[in-house]
Image (tube, rainbow, N blue to C red):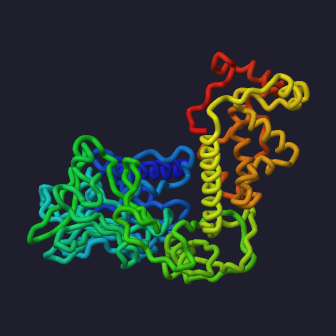
Amino acid sequence: MMAINKRNLLLLCLSCCYFFISPSYSDSNTLEQSQHLEDGQHLVSADKTFKLGFFSPGTSKYRYLGIWFNTPYDENYPELFDSRKVVWVANRNIPIFEKSGVLLMIDELGKLKISFNGGSSIALSFVQSKNINASATLLDSGNFVFKEVDSDGSTERILWQSFDYPTDTLLPGMKLGMNLKTGHFWSLTSWISESLPAEGSFSLTTGVGINGSSLIIIRWKRSVYWTSGVWQNGYFELLPTLSNEGYGYKNFSYISNEYEKYFTYSIIGNHTLARYMLDSKGAIAESTGLAPFGACSYKFDLGCVEQILPDCRSRNDRFELRKGFMSVQGVTFDGSYNLSLFDCEAICLNNCSCRAYDFFINGSQTGCEIWSEETGFTEYNNGRDIYVLNHSNKDHENEHEMLLYGLEANTTKRQKRGRKKSNELQVFSLESIASATNNFASTNKLGEGGFGPVYKAWQLWNEDRALEVIDSEVGESCPRADEVNRCIHVSLLCVQDQAKDRPTMENVVLMLTKETMPLPPPQQPAFFINTVEEEAEERGNKSDNCSINNVSISVMVAR
């Protein structure tokens, strides 16, 4: 018993010693030469804005060393790391598979490196010396600085810093340009996807305009995709919002001298989460949530370089993400190409025989699978994600134009015909009205308050004769019967008795433009005398505010 107590006491003492001797990184922003940072430990900047450590983006199992905003996790998905917060990745092209045994360290030669797999390593800095005294600090700016220090702890020289090797994010104080002495470029490169930080297809760099002025360029692979226009008078020609006048808390500047040329910006006041990020589709997103710039996607907007498409494609052609499966296996592009989702869409869009595509991630590699026009697609809720081509359908566009033209011609004809007639009102006798309405029978009543046409259309709809509402003078210019029927269907949905049943204008647009979208059956139109009793009772039991004529106040959304 005595021996057991001594052994337990010894274990307790060793545990206490380990607790006090082991470095704690809960509040530390510096890694000393005698320390190492294990997977699960972190460095936190002094002002708590940034955190450095190992992470796995999205659902990926690979480990990366990175820096991210030190903000809470998404409460809805606490098990997932929010890759949108990441501002820098050390080993973006060399992922680490295992989690145990991974650590960041400064070795005896003064080299900053990631060590893993029992001896393998990824060097971050290449300056080394046997007698160096070095440390690495995560600054409040988000810059991870590896430096040589004197005996008193002061910085002697900077050996390496993360700001010199940005990934997809430009933080305040970072540079975008070139060091003319060393030839080193400061540029951004997009991630392949949200779960794969490897270098994607888009890059953001500086360039020189025709007159020698500087500008910012987004390149897709090696081709110019978007340009900011030249820098003049404190702003870019094609991007006037990105200026000191456009933001009250950002100070933009372009530095050009014999040593370096670069674009940068600083923050005025307390805006700690400011950044610009180049996403996997080539757009530059702001932390403020404003609309991104550089979002071209085959549209000819300001600054976008027009992408040449084959004659078989229209700029209105779009790929819709759908669930299902294709009838046969598609053509697969090797994952070693490291293609992004945007690349897969471009491959399919530029191939006239391509009908659909899918983007896949195989470990640390990506690729595309494409299907031809002859391949059948089956909708299935539990199927795989497939991007299916939705043609703009020029024939339909022409039919819509013909319909509008026919309506316009009919209206003009009626107006001209009306001007030729007398301005006097037509007078009808009581006998003629009684005869026309079968002695005012309720079956012939067309409605009240201008809703006669609605009543008539509803009546014809229930009798499966909706197409009879078409004016005979417009009949020949009308498009297909199913299109007219769909328009009538949507119109009746918009005038349903219950406001909660009526679609918003956003849904109306979708209903009219997406022919595959199923439509609910229309309910009885509003302003009918014999309204549905159950709905009337339901209205009476609610405490919703109503107008004086018991009509519900509309929701503040366009209908």
Instruction: Where is residue 248? Give x, y as percent.
Output: 25, 43
Towards the viewer: 243 or 33: 243
Q: Quadrant of residue 479?
A: bottom right
Q: Residue furthest left?
A: 258
Q: Is residue 197 above or below residue 423?
A: below
Please report the residue visible at 31 percent of the width from the left and 46 percent of the height from the top: 272
Instruction: Where is residue 287? Give x, y as percent.
Output: 37, 50
Instruction: Where is residue 101? Give x, y as percent.
Output: 45, 67
Q: Quadrant of residue 463?
A: top right
Residue 554 visible: yes
Towards the viewer: 325 or 527: 527
Instruction: Where is residue 77? Give x, y as percent.
Output: 56, 49
Q: Quadrant of residue 179?
A: bottom left
Q: Is residue 51 above or below residue 34?
A: above
Q: Is residue 87 above or below residue 557?
A: below
Residue 161 visible: no
Towards the viewer: 155 or 520: 520
Please report the residue visible at 62 percent of the width from the left and 32 percent of the height from the top: 423
Please report the residue visible at 57 percent of the width from the left and 68 percent of the height from the top: 317
The answer to whether 258 appears left or right of 59 in the picture is: left
What count of labels does the image hold?
Answer: 0
The answer to whether 480 appears left or right of 248 in the picture is: right
Towards the viewer: 522 or 461: 461
Please report the residue visible at 48 percent of the width from the left and 50 percent of the height from the top: 6
The C terminus - image quarter: top right
